[in-house]
């Protein structure tokens, strides 16, 4: 690892980092102590303004692209070099925790503040990004901003948000522009790499007494949208034998889904299968449910096993429809294969952690991340931070201040090591 002795002594301002995390948690704060900042919601728009103001105050060049990703750049001394991109996301799941995504953005901000404060020049431009809408939404996307950058965003422009606004309108209000997305993904500037710090969202670090770990890659994720069509009718006057109840079909299906991973558990004990979204129409106590829409989320680190889970889920949906006399419509919302991160950045990340006394084996992520899609543009790598009890997507998400500071130290050192290395002077070559 090419880090000078002086750079190996650098530390971020731990108190400032923690204060900023606290302040950012006020945007969309919930009574339970977490945050609710779904993409394009008023708190999401408010925290974007706060983040941009913080970066402008630091003298960074702030720009918003067509996907409403917010970039904050500190120019390097050699403008011919590709950018080193760092960051994560500021949106959250409904009633989520303070650190999923925000930790990576605020650690990135602390890296920038430290570089500015020390007046430390870099050869590469360092760019901090807050990516739009990483979390899954009911309007059909997740990792919105990173998929847009990689040219992988499906056309959801006319899909409706919970407030009735279309994605196109909501994106415009956040500073993006649907019709410019295509041009954005073809005209992007070259990247040397992308680095993301993120809470682990699992218990492996806690169990082994480690604060940080390098990440080797991300599991595959498959999502179906499944719609059961029955016949709406009067709950008192339609006899039990005459009914086509879409919610009964959905219930049979939902009970079958958690059993699916057992079939692949010998090969992948981490495989999961979940139904986390359900919409009942008309959702009235005295009307037989006529239509139910649900979304399955299937995960495995092995592409073949993931395909088997997807086939198993579709077969269960067809069986539930048959058993209830309903009809079923199955569409694929997401088919994202497992990703192994680029070895060159993983080596840097592992060396930086070793140097900080945090050496150890790499972890595979069971959560989806923007680094999956940015990894299609340039070498990407991640750093996991211990979180209490592995609790995440929950207001009780919790991180130790010392662990957060160590993560920002590691990010700072990884940036400086990459900046010093000639291996990253050419634009990163995508993995696939
Ligand atoms: C992101 O949080 C995901 O894994 O769904
Ligand atoms: Mn996240
Ligand atoms: Mn998340």
Image (cartoon, rainbow, N blue to C red):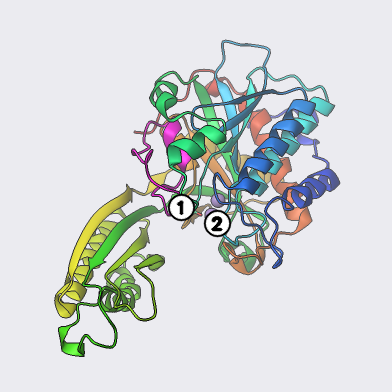
Query: Which residue corresponds to the image point at 21% horizontal and 60% vertical from the top-left?
Result: 329
* Mark 2 C-beta closer than 8 Å to ligand 3: yes
Q: Which mark is residue 136?
A: 1
Instruction: Check if mark 2's residue and mark 1's residue have beta carbons within 8 Å.
Output: yes
Nearest the viewer among 429 and 294 is 294
Is residue 18 left or right of 363 when viewed as pictured?
A: right
* Residue 157 percent across, percent down from the top left: 38, 38
Query: Which residue corresponds to the image point at 24% horizontal and 87% vertical from the top-left?
Result: 237
* Mark 2 residue crowding within 10 angstroms, few (<14) / some (14–19) / many (20+): many
Q: Which residue is mark 2?
A: 93
Considering only order in the chain, which callout, 1 or 2, is on the residue closer to the N terminus?
Answer: 2
* Mark 1 C-beta closer than 8 Å to ligand 1: yes
* Residue 234 percent across, percent down from the top left: 27, 81
Q: Residue 201 magenta-drawn? A: no
Q: Is residue 167 above or below residue 112?
A: below
Magenta stretch secondary structure, dominant: loop
Nearest the viewer among 377 and 2 is 377
Q: What residue span does the magenta drawing correspond to?
A: 137-162
* Residue 120 percent across, percent down from the top left: 78, 22
Can residue 68 be seen at all in this image of the molecule?
no
* Mark 1 residue crowding within 10 angstroms, few (<14) / some (14–19) / many (20+): some
């Amino acid at each position: 690892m090419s880090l000078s002795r002086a750079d190996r002594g650098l530390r971020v301002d731990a108190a400032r980092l923690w204060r900023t995390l606290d302040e950012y948690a006020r945007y969309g704060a919930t009574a339970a102590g977490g945050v609710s900042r779904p993409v394009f919601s008023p708190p999401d728009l408010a925290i974007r303004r706060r983040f941009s103001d913080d970066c402008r105050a630091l003298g960074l060049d702030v720009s918003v692209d067509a996907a409403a990703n917010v970039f904050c750049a500190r120019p390097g001394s050699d403008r011919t070099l590709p950018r080193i991109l760092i960051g994560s996301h500021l949106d959250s799941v409904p009633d989520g925790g303070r650190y999923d995504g925000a930790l990576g953005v605020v650690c990135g901000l602390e890296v920038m503040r430290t570089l500015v404060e020390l007046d430390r020049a870099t050869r590469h431009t360092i760019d901090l990004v807050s990516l739009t809408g990483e979390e899954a939404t009911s309007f059909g996307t997740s990792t919105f901003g990173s998929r847009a950058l990689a040219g992988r965003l499906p056309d959801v422009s006319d899909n409706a948000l919970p407030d009735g606004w279309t994605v196109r309108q909501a994106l415009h209000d956040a500073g993006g522009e649907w019709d410019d997305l295509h041009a954005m993904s073809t005209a992007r500037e070259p990247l040397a790499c992308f680095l993301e710090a993120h809470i682990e969202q699992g218990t492996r670090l806690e169990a082994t007494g480690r604060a940080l770990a390098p990440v080797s890659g991300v599991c595959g994720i498959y999502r179906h949208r499944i719609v059961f069509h029955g016949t709406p009718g009067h709950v008192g006057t339609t006899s039990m034998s005459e009914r086509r109840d879409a919610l009964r079909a959905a219930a049979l299906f939902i009970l079958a889904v958690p059993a699916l991973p057992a079939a692949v558990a010998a090969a992948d004990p981490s495989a999961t299968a979940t139904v986390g979204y359900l919409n009942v129409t008309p959702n009235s106590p005295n009307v037989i449910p006529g239509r139910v829409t649900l979304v399955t989320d299937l995960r495995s680190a092995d592409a073949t096993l993931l395909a088997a889970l997807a086939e198993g889920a579709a077969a269960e949906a067809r069986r539930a429809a048959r058993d209830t006399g309903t009809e079923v419509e199955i569409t694929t919302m997401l088919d994202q294969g497992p990703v192994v991160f680029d070895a060159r950045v993983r080596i840097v990340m592992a060396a930086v952690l070793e140097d900080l006394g945090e050496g150890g084996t790499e972890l595979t992520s069971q959560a989806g991340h923007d680094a999956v899609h940015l990894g299609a543009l340039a070498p990407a790598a991640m750093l996991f931070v211990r979180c209490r009890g592995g609790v995440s997507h929950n207001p009780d998400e919790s991180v130790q201040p010392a662990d957060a500071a160590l993560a920002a130290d590691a990010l700072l050192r990884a940036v400086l090591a990459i900046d010093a290395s000639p291996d990253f002077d050419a634009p990163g070559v995508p993995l696939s």
